[in-house]
Amino acid sequence: MSEKILVYIDQFKGKALPTSWEALNAANWLVGQIGGEVLAVTVGEGSQKVAMEAFGFGCTSVFYNDQSDLSDYRAEPYASLVSKVVEEQGCGYLLFPTTTRGRELAAMCSIDLKTGVMPDVTALEMEDGKVLATRPVYAGKLLSKVYCEATPTIITFRARAFTKPEFDGSRSGTPEVVEIAVDDSDNKSKVVGYSEGEVGVSLTDAGVIVSGGRGVSNNPELTPPADLDEKAAEIWRAQEGFKLVKELAAVVNGAVGASRAAVDAGYVPYSHQVGQTGKIVSPDLYIACGISGAIQHLAGMRTSKAIVAINKDPDAPIFKLARFGVVGDLYDILPPLTDALRNRLGK
């Protein structure tokens, strides 16, 4: 058995998302098991640069399209282009990173190619000549092993499930342009503009995440301005508490996360939310500060390599999942912890 394995490289203006290279490493693993070759496809403004880069990560053939009417991501023409490459190249596997665009394209390509999708996969293995995929189900409480009987097999990979492959600058090649006619009458979505998000380490790419929950607002020693009402005073206290979370994250070059309760209460923007209805993360280290551990939050971070929980309640559910637990007030624990790490890291 030998297959062509196509990987979609998700990129924005010439910069590939790191999870795309991780998906490419999963393709390299597949080739080691079943033989074949790794191909890549990327679309949009700056995609030629990314296509050249893909050769250094082990691709034998790379396809791209950076024509002006495909500069901005739109699901309909992008899915048509990716499906076209699969069909023309006779690919047996189509792999995506589990990004927002990757999820959408995987679903649309499965319709075009009349096949199924194995989403949010965290591991692969071979059994009786079949590729088995492991994926979390029931909010991460269980791990399911599945396989796809249809061809091509479409898989999306959770961020950090696979490591990024080593880049070899001696590998090179000439990427091939994929031509496709774009009929705007068939495209229901239009891009009207972009706005810059918060500057900082991306949650989905971070190796370390420090998250805060409702508990960051529970410091009675903080005295809010007298003109604030009760709700505004709560938010003021929480934002003071999140300063400690952000300081610790900065020292360890990590990202700042939050529980749904914290973002719903207005402590931090929704872009920081980790959980079933927020971002799904798998960092090497996850530090939960003042987070009790609702099942919706655990579903978004339970695959973290190591979890540290800091909470005043010794019966908080988060301790059942944590490798290390500290029972205490985060206001007492975070400042000395941050100072100790700053000294240890020489910052």
Image (cartoon, rainbow, N blue to C red):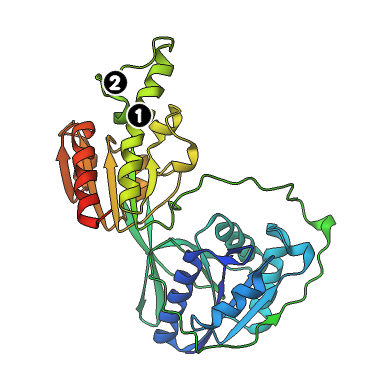
Q: Is residue 23 above or below residue 137?
A: below
Identified at 39% across, 63% down, the residue is 160
- The answer to the question of whether label 1 and label 2 lie on touching residues, with beta carbons closer than 8 A, is yes
Image position of 20 (left or right of 164): right
Task: Report x, y in % for residue 190.
Answer: 75, 50
Q: How packed is label 1: few (under 14 Cα within 10 Å), some, or many (20 or more)?
A: some
Q: Is residue 329 above or below residue 180?
A: above
Image position of 11 (left or right of 229): right
Q: Nearer the viewer, residue 69 or 130?
A: 69
Dot 1 corresponds to which residue?
240
Q: Which mark is residue 65?
A: none
Q: Nearer the viewer, residue 325 or 39?
A: 325
Identified at 39% across, 13% down, the residue is 230
Q: How many marks?
A: 2
Task: Report x, y in % for residue 180.
Answer: 78, 72
| Residue 277 appears anywhere in the view | no
The CA distance from mark 1 to mark 2 is 8 Å
Q: Is residue 325 above or below residue 107?
A: above
Q: Which mark is residue 222?
A: 2
Task: Report x, y in % for residue 47.
Answer: 65, 70
Q: Earlier in the sequence, mark 1 or mark 2?
A: 2
Residue 259 quadrant: top left
Identified at 78% across, 65% down, the residue is 68
Task: Report x, y in % for residue 28.
Answer: 44, 81
Q: How packed is label 2: few (under 14 Cα within 10 Å), some, or many (20 or more)?
A: some
- Amino acid found under the numbered disc labelled 2: Leu
- Amino acid found under the numbered disc labelled 1: Glu
